[in-house]
Amino acid sequence: QVQLVESGGGLVQAGGSLRLACAASGRISSSGVMGWFRQAPGKEREFVAAISRSGGITHYQDSVKGRFTISRDHAKNTVYLQMNSLKPEDTAVYYCAADSNPYYSGLYSYTASSRVYDYWGQGTQVTVSS
């Protein structure tokens, strides 16, 4: 069984930075892709960023490109999301997710769909004040 635990959320002023971490336990090494999603109050959950098992493929939602960076540390079984130049519209609960399928196509359309991911963390709140 795979468990994902997020940390690093908090309250920050606009323009500030946060780094989220997703610590994984279980057979996460076989996961083809791991991602971050977020959900703001009254809105649907949306894709933020994802990274392949090797780290060679990354995808980002357009609104976070150039500001957010996803990375993966296999030794620590952890995926990170470095968030810079934060904006009030980035306020949401951020969720880590992992796909159980070891074969990853690398396609953005596949990666950005929440249906792809079999395992989810409990979420961590990020609040950006203006």
Image (cartoon, rainbow, N blue to C red):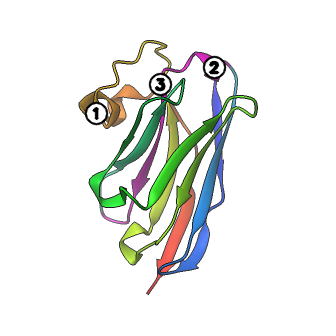
Task: Look at the image and say whether residue 61 sits in the magenta stretch.
Answer: no
Residue at the spot of label 1? 108
Measure the alpha-carbon separation of dots 1 and 3: 14 Å
Q: Position of residue 108 (x, y in %)?
A: 28, 33
Above/below status of 80 relative to 12 = above
Placement of 60 over or under 109, stated as above or below: below
Q: Nearer the viewer, residue 66 or 26?
A: 66
| Range of magenta residues | 27-42
Is the residue marked by circle 3 packed among few (<14), some (14-19), or many (20+) residues within 10 Å? many
Q: Residue at x 75, y 29 (%)?
A: 75
Q: In which quadrant will I find the N terminus?
A: top right
Label 1 element class:
helix
Amino acid, disc 2: Ser
Residue 37 belongs to the span the image colors magenta: yes
Q: Quadrant of residue 124?
A: bottom right
Task: State the residue position of label 3.
Answer: 99
- Numbered disc in front, either 3 or 2: 2
